[in-house]
Each structure stands twice: as structure tokens, then as C-alpha cells.
């Protein structure tokens, strides 16, 4: 597998607990390099647009409200097979089902407040990276 990039978000439950460094350590130990990163606060419209694929899901409104409840850290991760590698480091959506050693097992609070987002395919990674980062920010 070639070196690739994926989009990661450290979610409001994690920024609130000041554990972004602990999460970044697990990403780095898992073989991913943080090549771009910034902290920001999403607007409702931005959260809705980012999670547009989930618009029809029962949890969509609650998810968008949660994602604007505090700051997030958006980051671009680079490494071998970055999308799948990050999904493995993150663990299952529901922290209760996540494997030992994963971010969500260690830090996730419940199926919604699960500490991190990660792109689910190389195509979506491209789109999600461009949602948050400009060309000049991706040159590093
Ligand atoms: P993942 O983040 O693992 O890719 P999904 O794309 O299915 O999971 O869902 C996006 C986000 O929506 C999840 O990370 C979580 O914050 C929230 N979510 C997913 N399922 C539920 C649920 N059943 N109830 C509440 N929130 C949920
Ligand atoms: Mg997803």
C-alpha cells in the first residue's frame, strides 16, 4: 500500500477534556504523521454540510449539535494505507465495542461522543481534507 492521507477530527468531548495530545500520541505511535492541524469551532451549517451523508439518519441533528458544542481539532494524517490505518487506531464507532488499545476504547464516552472522526474511504478522505484545508496548508 502506498503512502496516503486521511482526514481526522478530534471531537468536542476530547477537546473539553484536554486530551488532544494523548490522542495525537496514539496516532503517531500507530504510524501516522500529522501533516496539517488546526483547532476551530464549526458553525451549524458547516457541521450539517460535513455530515451531509448522514442527513437521513435519526442521529443527524443530535450529531450536528454535538459537533458545534465546543472546539474541534481537524487534522490531516499521512502514512501507509492512512484511511484504514486510522480506522484501526480509532476503533469501532461505539466505544463499548472498540478493541483494547484503540482511541475510542481509551477515551470515547458513548456512541455519539466517541472522541474522533476518521474518513472511511480514500475518495471521502480527499473530499474531507479539501473541506477543511487549503492548498497552501497541505504543502507540509
Ligand atoms: P464513524 O464515525 O465510526 O465513521 P458513522 O459514520 O456511522 O461512524 O457515524 C458518524 C458519527 O455519528 C459517529 O462517529 C458518532 O459520533 C455519531 N453516531 C453514529 N451512530 C450513532 C448513534 N446510533 N447514535 C448517536 N450518534 C451516533
Ligand atoms: Mg463515518
Image (cartoon, rainbow, N blue to C red):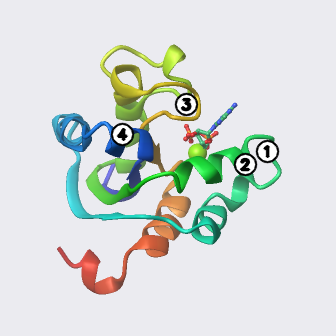
Q: Secondary structure at mark 4?
A: helix
Residue 18 placement, left or right of 81: left
Q: Say whether residue 133 is visible.
A: yes
Nearer the observer, disc 1 or disc 4? 4
| Residue at image mark 4 | 14
In the displayed structure, would residue 135 be above or below residue 103? below
Dividing the image into four quarters, tell me where ligand 1 lies: top right
Number of residues whose C-alpha sits closer than 10 Å to that of mark 3, classed few (under 14), some (14–19) or many (20 or more)? many
| Residue at image mark 3 | 93
Q: Are marks 1 and 4 in contact (CB under 8 Å)?
A: no
* Residues at marks 1 and 2, CA–CA distance in whole angstroms: 5 Å
| Residue at image mark 1 | 57
The verdict on label 3 being within 8 Å of ligand 1 is: yes
Number of residues whose C-alpha sits closer than 10 Å to that of mark 1, classed few (under 14), some (14–19) or many (20 or more)? few
* Residues at marks 3 and 1, CA–CA distance in whole angstroms: 15 Å
* Residues at marks 1 and 4, CA–CA distance in whole angstroms: 24 Å
Q: Are marks 4 and 2 in contact (CB under 8 Å)?
A: no
* Residues at marks 4 and 3, CA–CA distance in whole angstroms: 15 Å
Residue at 47 percent across and 19 percent down: it is 98
Q: Quadrant of the C terminus?
A: bottom left
Residue 83 placement, left or right of 58: left
| Residue at image mark 2 | 60
Number of residues whose C-alpha sits closer than 10 Å to that of mark 2, classed few (under 14), some (14–19) or many (20 or more)? some
Residue 52 sits in quarter: bottom right
Number of residues whose C-alpha sits closer than 10 Å to that of mark 4, classed few (under 14), some (14–19) or many (20 or more)? many
* Residue 91 image position (x, y, % from top left): 44, 28
The verdict on label 4 being within 8 Å of ligand 1 is: no
Q: Are marks 1 and 2 in contact (CB under 8 Å)?
A: yes
Give the mark, 4 or 3, whose residue is nearer the N terminus: 4
Residue 76 sits in quarter: bottom left
Q: Nearer the viewer, residue 116 or 91?
A: 116
Amino acid at each position: 500500500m502506498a503512502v496516503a492521507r486521511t482526514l481526522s477530527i478530534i471531537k468536542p468531548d476530547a477537546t473539553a477534556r484536554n486530551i488532544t495530545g494523548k490522542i495525537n500520541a496514539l496516532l503517531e505511535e500507530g504510524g501516522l504523521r500529522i501533516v496539517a492541524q488546526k483547532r476551530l469551532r464549526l458553525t451549524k451549517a458547516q457541521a450539517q454540510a460535513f455530515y451531509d451523508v448522514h442527513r437521513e439518519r435519526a442521529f443527524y441533528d443530535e450529531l450536528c449539535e454535538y459537533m458545534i458544542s465546543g472546539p474541534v481539532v481537524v487534522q490531516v494524517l499521512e502514512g501507509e494505507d492512512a484511511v484504514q490505518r486510522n480506522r484501526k487506531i480509532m476503533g469501532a464507532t461505539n466505544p463499548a465495542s472498540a478493541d483494547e488499545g484503540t482511541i475510542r476504547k481509551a477515551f470515547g464516552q458513548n456512541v455519539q461522543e466517541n472522541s474522533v472522526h476518521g474518513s472511511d474511504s480514500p475518495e471521502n478522505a480527499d473530499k474531507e481534507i479539501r473541506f477543511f484545508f487549503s492548498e497552501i496548508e497541505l504543502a507540509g
